[in-house]
Image (cartoon, rainbow, N blue to C red):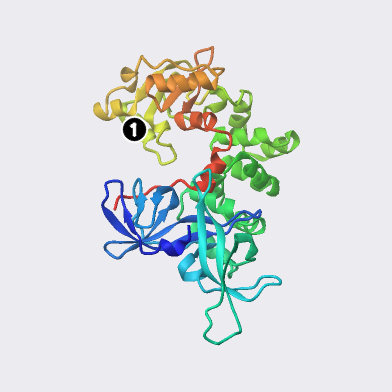
Amino acid sequence: MFVSRVKGLPILDASGDQVGKVRDVVVQNRSNARPPRVKGLVVELLRLRRVFLPMERVHSIDAQQVIISGVVNTVAFKRREGERLVFADLFDMAVTRPEAPAASIFDVAIERTRTRAWEISEVALREVTRRTPFSRGHVVVVPWNDVPDFFAEAEQGTDQMLAQLSEMKPADVARELHEMDPDRRDEVIEALEDDVLAEALEELPESEQVQVIQKLDMERAADILEEMDPDDAADLIAELAPDLAERILQRMEPDEAKDVRALLNYSAATAGGLMTPEPVIVGTDATVADCLALLRHEEVTPALAALAFVCRPPLDAPTGRYVGAVHIQKLLREPPSLLAASLVDSDIAPLRPDADVALVSRYFATYDLVCAPVVDADGRLVGAVTVDDVLDHILPDDWRGIQLAEGVTDGATV
């Protein structure tokens, strides 16, 4: 499909209502000789505001309209590094091909791949003729890789790039890093704050995580792993060569390294390998107010905040005797001074560390939980498994690569 046929088409939502019109197509070059990716459309809403519509939201395109699904993010469109606008930037741009007449870009063809992502497949070129000054020239259609460097542009400064990345979610930062050429990625990674890089690293495929860590010096690698969730850090450490893994662990803070080493004792596809050793744990004398104060801490993920675990001292995993779990919804409905231990849900049976991922996934489906306790044979709480950790292991092995290729977006309704 040539994009000249897309411009100006009305955008209709699933109910058939028009939300805007197509004004441009956003594309981005990729490394490793892959076709440029079509990231999305620039859509002019009916109130003349231009926003970005990811291609994942496009259900179908025909000669009369574009049908979309889901919601549209109404934040004003801002171009990111490496992105080009087909109509604004590429149309009429002069290109040079070896042993071919001089030409300019006349149109660009896009197609949907088997993974439902979109990419540039062909380029229509208008060749320059010398017959008359007013000759429009002959149009030829060539494969995308017959037009070398038609994405070439001045590279964005590192400071500007870092400013953009600081405003993105970790998954979006990971996607930007994934799309950068290796030299550029190394430069940006070197300048990123440790916490930003750690969160982005958790969203990359394991092979790319290993590549990043192997290029860092030992001290920086240890700092990054300390910033990661212990279970994610353990998964990454397990993928490294044993000697490199040990050198990094020795440079980590003792408490952080202890948590990671403990998780490495379990198979990756068991409750012990999936769990985090840092859930919200309170003593038997804790009140509802004490629990809520811990659950609302910004470092506690939404899944971990679903339950508070009541235990006997010591309160660091592995704890003293495990008493039970309390739902945050229950805590929100009770007086602040009430003891949390009196609200324990006796129906939540704890998982054993050696429970395999199939059993764990059935457990979550059966009890409609997003977080579950893991208790050892001595009755001590050793950690908690969250539903996102389970999904990581039951999705296809290359799911992160697919996510980076196709994108996962969110947004507000128009």
Quarter assignment of residue 255? top right
Q: How many marks?
A: 1
Residue for badge 1 = 292
Residues 245 and 259: in front is: 245
Residues 88 and 270: in front is: 88
Residue 291 visible, this orientation: yes
**209 in relation to 1, above or below:** above
Q: Is residue 189 left or right of residue 392?
A: right
User: Residue, x 61% and y 30% (percent of image)?
Assistant: 258
**333 in relation to 134, above or below:** above
Q: Give amino acid for label 1.
A: Leu
Q: Residue furthest right?
A: 243
Residue 340 screen position, x and y as percent: 33, 23
User: Residue, x 49% and y 31% (percent of image)?
Assistant: 391
**223 in relation to 140, above or below:** above
Residue 24 screen position, x and y as percent: 42, 64
Q: Residue furthest bottom?
A: 133
Residues 340 and 220: in front is: 220
CA neighbours of label 1 inside 10 A, class few (<14), some (14 to 19), many (20+)? some
Q: Is residue 276 left or right of residue 348?
A: right
**SS for tag 1?**
helix
User: Residue, x 51% and y 60% (percent of image)?
Assistant: 109
Q: Residue furthest front?
A: 131
Residues 355 and 92: in front is: 92
Residue 260 screen position, x and y as percent: 60, 31
Residue 316 screen position, x and y as percent: 50, 26
